[in-house]
Amino acid sequence: MADETPSPPPTPVIEPPKRIDATFRNGSVTAIGVVLAFSLGFLNNWASQPGNWIPEDLAAVVLIAVGIVFQIWSMAGMLSVSSLEEPIYRRIVRIFLIGLILVSIGVLVAISGDALGYSRLLLKP
């Protein structure tokens, strides 16, 4: 009884993060790539149209450009091997959704700006 040493505390077992199936991730890469291509295509097509720009157009361009940056960021993250871990995958999907929402708002601003621009031309005395 004189020489009892306390036992060390048990070391916590660290479980590895859950992983998603690579096939599921590949589908996500495809979906992000298609949406990114449409976003870039819309911006390219809209910017190459002749006509005068109005201030609403600049707001739309900024929203679309920032949204595209988020989409590219999510595509780069999804191509990483670490995106097979569920927490990282979920974070990348949130980044993509932020980009998708920003691009959508930018497209709506662009459409409304064009509608306002056309109405200004039609209502001009």
Image (cartoon, helix red, strand yellow):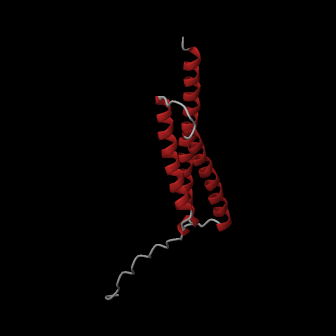
- Of 116 and 106, nearer the camera is 116
> What residue do we see at 56% from left, 23% from top?
116
The one nearer the camera, 2 or 30, is: 30
| Residue 69, above or below 47 | below
Q: Nearer the viewer, residue 86 or 26?
A: 26
Residue 87 in view in this figure: no
Q: Is residue 113 above or below residue 38?
A: above
Q: Residue at x 61, y 51 (%)?
A: 37
Residue 124 to residue 27: above or below: above
52 lies left or right of 33: left
| Nearer-the-camera pick, 6 or 17 | 17
- Can see residue 7? yes
Give x and y (percent) for residue 13: 49, 73
Residue farthest toward the front in the current orientation of the protein:
50
- Counting every numbered tag in the picture gives 0
Dividing the image into 4 quarters, which one contains the C terminus? Answer: top right
**Residue 113 place in picture, x, y as percent:** 54, 28
Asked which quadrant contains residue 28, the reply is bottom right
Q: Is residue 30 left or right of residue 113?
A: right
Q: Note whether 104 is above or below 26 in the view shown.
A: above
Q: Quadrant of the N terminus?
A: bottom left
Percent across and percent down for residue 17 are 54, 67
Residue at 62% x, 48% y: name it: 38
Question: Residue 52, how many percent across, how many down?
Answer: 51, 30
Residue that extends furthest to the top in the rendered view of this protein: 125
